[in-house]
Amino acid sequence: MKINKSDIENLERRYRGTFFNSLAGYKQAFLIGTQSVVGLQNLAIFNSLIHIGASPALYGVLFRPDTVQRDTLKNILETGFYTFNFVETKDWEKAHQTSAKYENSVSEFEEVGFQAEVTTSFFAPFVQESPIKIGLKFESKIEIPQNGTILVIGSIETIELADNLVSADGYVDLEKAHVLGCVGLDAYFEPKTIGRLSYAKADKWPEKI
Amino acid sequence: MKINKSDIENLERRYRGTFFNSLAGYKQAFLIGTQSVVGLQNLAIFNSLIHIGASPALYGVLFRPDTVQRDTLKNILETGFYTFNFVETKDWEKAHQTSAKYENSVSEFEEVGFQAEVTTSFFAPFVQESPIKIGLKFESKIEIPQNGTILVIGSIETIELADNLVSADGYVDLEKAHVLGCVGLDAYFEPKTIGRLSYAKADKWPEKI
């Protein structure tokens, strides 16, 4: 099928949302853990982890203005700290369930059955079951003028993962850790690695590494 | 392993780049096709497709300030049009090879062996072999203050994909089209779909759909 701009504008609202979310391709599913100023824990699934830079190490995440995920944004802005927790494929249903609209006073950790890992050295809770845990400090937010979407940028303060997931050159093997991926807002996958390729050069075809 | 902020700062530059790029998780690999004001075609692989919104339909892509990909950015800013082309898994080596530093005057289409699909109705070239082709019009760019990275936002003008990839509710089945995914700058995967889940509600566990 071929779709043009006027076809797009005529798509039914929910169809259009599902279509453009899934058309955007493979994403990293991850749980953001936060704690409110009065000590309530919050956990919610996201799919928009954006690699902003490695030096300094900065990751971004997008927040849509009209979603349930606003508890997470509020906590990040008020406390300055949050965690990214990757999910094992076996926990895909629990991870998805964190997107339900629970009351503010409800902890999604308890409701869906993840264990909150609280340390004295970091304000926000991690997910104990997570194979890859990243602690971030809020740096800045940028509003996208076209639709009010908010890009939140954080610096990476702490990372925890098993030694055997990291190759000698720094590559992190997500498949080995059974890390869950997602497409759109409701589809989940596991990866089957095809391979890695050497740095591409104009005079030479890349080699498998 | 546990890594803190000072460990991160002490990582060797290339190790750190590989580490944080791969740690950022599963991404959509895609080729951006552009044409310069003097008619030279350009094709380059990217991994930072960002879903900005469905209504209006907007996708973003990140450009790092110091990379080979600046030809693409220059063409987008000067001509206003560009294409996103997903890649079949069998073409993973050709797609990777577009990241080599070719001279400005060289067309990556010809060098790596993709066929440019030029139409009278769209300024930028598509990749004929691509199972999913998206034509975009430049809307705006936002510079990330921390490191000069540039977020380019475009509105979706045209989409072409096979009818049988789209479900009745608008979901696009990328696995069925053998769409290539990537991790970091040099690792590639194909997905194995686990399933889709119903919209999460606080009083009910999600169901497979």
Image (cartoon, coloured by chain):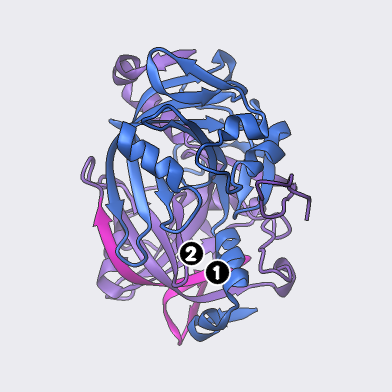
Chain colours: A blue, B purple
Asked if the residue under mark 1 is in contact with the one under mark 2, i.e. CB atoms within 8 Å, the reply is: yes
Q: Is residue A43 above or below residue B115?
A: above
Q: Earlier in the sequence, mark 2 or mark 1?
A: 2
Q: Residue B15 in magenta?
A: no
Chain under numbered label 2: B
Q: Which residue is mark 1?
A: B133
The amino acid marked with disc number 2 is Phe
Q: Secondary structure at mark 1?
A: strand
Q: CA distance from mark 2 to mark 1?
A: 6 Å
Q: Are marks 2 and 1 on the same chain?
A: yes
Chain under numbered label 1: B
- Report whether residue A83 is seen: yes
- Residue A184 falls left or right of residue B14: right
Residue B73's quadrant in the figure?
Answer: bottom left
Dot 2 alpha-carbon crowd within 10 angstroms: few under 14, some 14 to 19, many 20 or more: many
Q: Is residue B113 above or below residue B122?
A: above
Q: Is residue A63 above or below residue B119?
A: above
| Extreme-right residue of the structure | B208
Please provide the residue range marked out in magenta: B115-143
Dot 1 alpha-carbon crowd within 10 angstroms: few under 14, some 14 to 19, many 20 or more: many
Q: Nearer the viewer, residue A66 or A27?
A: A66
| Badge number at residue B1 | none
Q: Which SS does the magenta portion mostly show?
A: strand
- Report whether residue A59 is seen: no
Residue B166 in percent (x, y) is at: 70, 68
Residue A197 in percent (x, y) is at: 53, 37
